[in-house]
Image: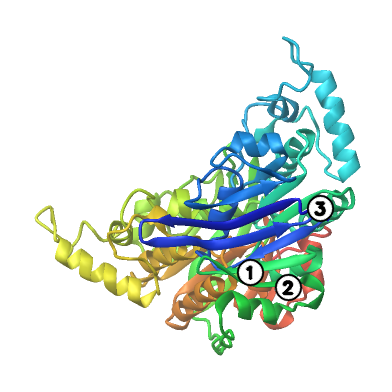
């Protein structure tokens, strides 16, 4: 059987960094290939080369027996290759149908046929289990629904090979199950998928073959049927993963953060956070699970002072800080680790050193009489890079050159090095590999052991149960099912996330 895709001897370097080194990668018709690797292993670069977003220094790509034009996304799309990115390329103010018609001339003619497009959307959505309303405005849809639009766009343009980049990192458990079911239907029709992920359980559940990259090279290829989480993790890191550090039992102290009936609107004016109430004590982690769209972002941003609440009050050590902004919260000892490290946590064009010192640059010893002491900032930056294992050529390197895991370590180093009293961590491991995920969790637990109060908000149930001293669920904008970790039950948490019941905290 002729391979659907052959990438032959692909090499790509960025200066002295060799992102891909002579990679050979093959996909057969009707096959799902899982692509694994730690952050910085070369997965994204390889797929960007395949999709034409990056031009390889060496090598060739053969699709359906014909060599593709290098560095041309248009050529890839025309050949039948589509890539679904983590960040969607949709026009928020348009409807689903209007987004799907953009740049598509398949029907020809000078006029756009909205009714015909809506019919095609409904047919494809029903066929593949991707329910979506063609008339819905994109800005009012959840992230999972927006992902379905991108997938439908690829299907309607005749894609025979889908590249999915960390597709489940933004999805709730039911949406993940729906996506995996779609992939199986797509494969059953003879199409193929490259599934890039860090979630070993998902790739084992859906892939036919698994390819592992490390340091820009293929270090292993194995049938999914014969692989285990342990064997894959070993290939990814090149060694046995060390056992997690022993988790000390918590002895909570006084209430540091108290939230009373807090409510907030999203960017479209919809009330997403509805009367959320809880207490957070010194020396504990309160971990909240929740499906996207149930108020997680609004809660985090409101607590951090980035958004004003609609109603309710926030107390820090008994003092009402509801009216204070982000600067006041920072000065009071509250640190915020947002989900969007690329756009919110870091300034991508700035150096690692400047990103690390953003919070401290205006005070001694880093600034004297309005002049920055570069020796002091450089020394502190190098110490923080060492303490948080940030891997980069030097502190002068731009933040955008770092892998996702190293970018998150920079954000952690900046916020946690200041020894905050309260930490708000919103999806802090989003898109990270197992090693980086463990580092983030252990860093926050270490801070808890030093007496800090940590609010950990995540859609990953395993993380919530692993890191929380108390565990709760944010459902329909309210805190429900709050319990000590020893009493937490996965089934009850899953039901609460799905909105099956509401139990007051």
Q: Earlier in the sequence, mark 3 or mark 2?
A: 3
Q: Is residue 484 left or right of residue 412?
A: right
Q: Are marks 3 and 2 in contact (CB under 8 Å)?
A: no
Instruction: Quadrant for residue 211, please give it.
Output: bottom right
For residue 222, the mark is 2
Q: CA distance from mark 3 to mark 2?
A: 17 Å
Q: What kind of element bears circle 3? A: loop
For the point 36% across and 73% down, the residue is: 419
Q: CA distance from mark 3 to mark 1?
A: 20 Å
For discs 3 and 1, the disc positioned in front in the rendered view: 3
Q: CA distance from mark 1 to mark 2?
A: 9 Å
User: Which quadrant: the C terminus?
Assistant: bottom right
Q: Are marks 3 and 1 in contact (CB under 8 Å)?
A: no
For the point 82% across and 71% down, the residue is: 491
Give the x, y percent position of residue 123. Answer: 89, 33
Q: Which residue is mark 1?
A: 212
Q: Give the class, few, some or many, for how many residues have Cα within 10 Å of label 3's Cα (few <14, many ≥20).
A: some
Q: How many marks?
A: 3
Q: Are marks 1 and 2 in contact (CB under 8 Å)?
A: yes
Rendered view: 340 above or below 455: above
Viewer can see residue 381: yes
Give the x, y percent position of residue 41. Answer: 53, 65
Give the x, y percent position of residue 22. Answer: 54, 62
Going by the picture, which residue comes out furthest to the top? 110
Give the x, y percent position of residue 459. Answer: 66, 62
For residue 230, the mark is none
For the point 51% across and 51% down, the residue is: 301
Out of 214 and 183, give the one closest to the viewer: 214
Q: Is residue 154 left or right of residue 423?
A: right
Q: Which residue is mark 3?
A: 29
Q: What kind of element bears circle 1? A: strand
């Amino acid at each position: 059987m002729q391979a659907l895709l052959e990438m032959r001897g692909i090499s790509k370097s960025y200066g002295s960094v060799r992102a891909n080194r002579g990679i050979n990668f093959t996909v057969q018709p009707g096959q799902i290939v899982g692509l694994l690797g730690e952050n910085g292993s070369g997965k994204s670069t390889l797929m960007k080369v395949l999709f034409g977003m990056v031009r390889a220094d060496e090598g060739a790509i053969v699709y359906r027996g014909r060599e593709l034009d290098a560095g041309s996304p248009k050529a890839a799309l025309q050949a039948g290759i589509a890539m679904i990115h983590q960040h969607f390329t949709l026009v928020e103010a348009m409807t689903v149908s209007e987004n799907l018609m953009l740049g598509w001339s398949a029907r020809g003619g000078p006029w756009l046929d909205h009714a015909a497009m809506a019919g095609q959307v409904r047919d494809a959505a029903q066929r593949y289990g991707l329910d979506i309303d063609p008339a819905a405005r994109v800005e009012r849809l959840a992230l999972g629904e927006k992902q379905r639009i991108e997938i439908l766009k690829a299907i309607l343009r005749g894609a025979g090979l889908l590249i999915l980049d960390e597709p489940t990192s933004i999805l709730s458990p039911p949406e993940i199950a729906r996506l995996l079911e779609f992939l199986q239907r797509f494969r059953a029709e003879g199409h193929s998928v490259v599934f890039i992920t860090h979630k070993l359980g998902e790739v084992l559940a859906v892939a036919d073959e698994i390819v592992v990259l490390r340091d820009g090279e293929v270090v292993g290829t194995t049938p999914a049927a014969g692989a285990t989480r342990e064997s894959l993790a070993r290939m990814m890191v090149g060694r046995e993963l060390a056992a997690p550090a022993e988790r000390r039992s918590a002895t909570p102290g006084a209430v540091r953060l108290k939230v009373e009936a807090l409510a907030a609107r999203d960017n479209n004016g919809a009330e997403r956070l509805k009367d959320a109430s809880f207490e957070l004590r010194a020396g504990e982690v309160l971990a909240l699970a929740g499906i996207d769209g149930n108020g997680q972002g609004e809660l985090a941003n409101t607590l951090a002072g980035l958004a004003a609440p609609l109603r309710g009050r926030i107390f820090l050590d008994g003092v009402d800080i509801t009216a204070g902004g982000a600067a006041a919260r920072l000065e009071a000892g509250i640190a915020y680790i947002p989900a969007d490290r690329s756009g919110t946590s870091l300034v991508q064009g700035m150096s690692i050193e400047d990103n690390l010192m953003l919070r401290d640059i205006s005070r001694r010893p880093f600034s004297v009489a309005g002049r920055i002491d570069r020796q002091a900032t450089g020394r502190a930056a190098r110490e923080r890079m060492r303490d948080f294992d940030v891997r980069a050529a030097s502190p002068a390197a731009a933040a955008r050159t770092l892998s996702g895991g190293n970018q998150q370590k920079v954000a952690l180093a900046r916020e946690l090095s200041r020894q905050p009293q309260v930490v708000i961590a919103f999806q802090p491991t989003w898109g990270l590999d197992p090693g980086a995920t463990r580092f983030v969790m252990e860093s926050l637990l270490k801070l808890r052991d030093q007496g800090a109060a940590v609010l950990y908000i995540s859609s990953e149930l395993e993380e919530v149960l692993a890191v929380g001293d108390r565990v709760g669920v944010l459902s329909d904008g309210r805190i429900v099912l709050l319990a000590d970790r020893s009493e937490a039950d996965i089934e009850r948490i899953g039901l609460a996330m799905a909105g099956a019941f509401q139990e007051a905290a």
